[in-house]
Amino acid sequence: MYWSYSSSKTFRRCQRRWYFQTIIPNSKPNAKDRIRREAFFLAQLQSVEAWRGSIVDWVIDKQIIRPLNQVGRFSEQRVWSYAEEIFNAQIQFAREKHYRDEGMTKTKGDDRYAALFLLEHGYLDVPETDLERAWQDIETALSNLLADDEIMFWLHEADQLLPQRNLFLHDDDFAVKAVPDVILFYEDAPPLIFDWKVHTTGQRDYWLQLACYALALTRSEPHKDFIVDPQKYSPAEVKLAEVQLLLPQTRWYELSEDDVDAVENYFYSSATDMLLALGDEGNEILRPLEFLPTQYPDEDCPTCPFQKMCGADTLWTK
C-alpha cells in the first residue's frame, strides 16, 4: 500500500472515497475487471478548479522548470502560447471523453489528457463563464509567478531543478509516496522545495504536506541523476515554501526536530489506520461498503466522482 499526504486527507474525510480512489482502481485502464476499470476512470475526474490548477502545474513544469534546468533560461512567450495551447486541447479532449478511449492512458494522453467531473456527470458542456474564470485564474497565477523576483531568484540560482519527481520511503508494510512540485538542489546549500497552489482564498496552509516532502527527500533512496545526496541533510535543514499563486503569497516553513518526529508519527499512525481498515484480505476482494462514508454528505457527496458507485449494493454482492 502507498501512503501519501493527499490519501491521508481523503481517508480522514471519507474512508469509502479513499477505497474507491486508491485501492480499487487497477494501475492500467484496460483492466479486465469492469468495476476496477470504471473506478480508474472515475479517479481521473477533476473539478474545473482543480483542472485549471493542473494546467498551471503543467506550464510551470514544461516551460519554466525544465528549460531552466536544461539551458538556464526560458521563454515567456512560450509560457503563454503553451498555456493557451494545452487549455484548448484539454477542454476538447475532456469534451470528447477521450480518456475513455480504448487503450488511453494518462501517459499516452500526455499534456492533452483531461477528465472533467461536470462532463461525466450530466452536463453537456462546461459553462462558458467557468471556462473564462479558469483562464483568468491561469493568467493571474502565471503572471504572479513570473513577476515574483524572490521565487525567480531561487529558480535561476539552483544548480539542478527537478519537477514532479516521485520519492518513496519504504516501510515493511507500506511505502510513503511524495511528489513535490519542484525540488531545487544547490551545491553549497540545502535543498529547497516549492509547492505551487492555485487557490482563490488560500486560507489553509500546507505545512504538513511540505514536511512530508522533506522527510521523503532526505530519507528515501536518492535518484541516480541527483547532483546532491539529500540524505546528508536532515529534514529540518530543507527549505520549504508554499507558493499561493493567485493571492500572491509565499509561505516559508521551517521544521524543528520535534516537528520531524511529529510528522513521522503522523504518517506511521495514518498508514496503520489504513492497513487496519483493509485487513488481511487487502485488495483481493471488492468491499467498499465496509468502509465508513463521509460525515458531511451535503458537502462531500455532490462533487464526489464515485457517487454512482457508492452505496450501489448490487455491484458488491459477489
Image (cartoon, grey):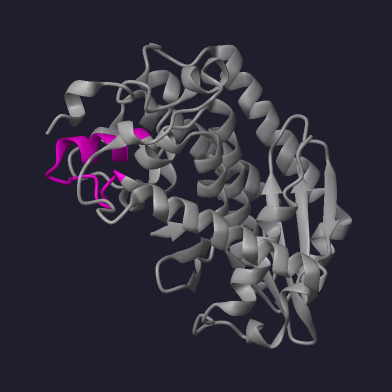
Query: What residue appears at the point 60 percent right and 13 percent down from the top-left corner?
Result: 129
Q: Looking at the picture, how far across and down is residue 308, in whole percent?
A: 32, 21
Number of numbered discs overlaid on the protein picture: 0
Q: Is residue 192 above or below residue 94?
A: below
| Depth check, front residue: 120 or 292 | 292
Confirm whether residue 182 shows in the render: no
Quadrant assignment, res 39: top left
Q: Looking at the picture, how far across and down is residue 279, in whole percent?
A: 33, 52
Is 26 part of what is drawn in magenta?
yes
Q: Is residue 90 above or below residue 28?
A: above
Residue 93 falls left or right of residue 228: left
| Depth check, front residue: 119 or 138 | 119
What segment carries the magenta color?
Answer: 24-42
Q: Looking at the picture, how far across and down is residue 182, in whole percent?
A: 64, 62
Residue 26 falls left or right of residue 110: left
Q: Looking at the picture, how far across and down is residue 103, in whole percent?
A: 19, 45
Q: Is residue 182 above or below residue 140?
A: below
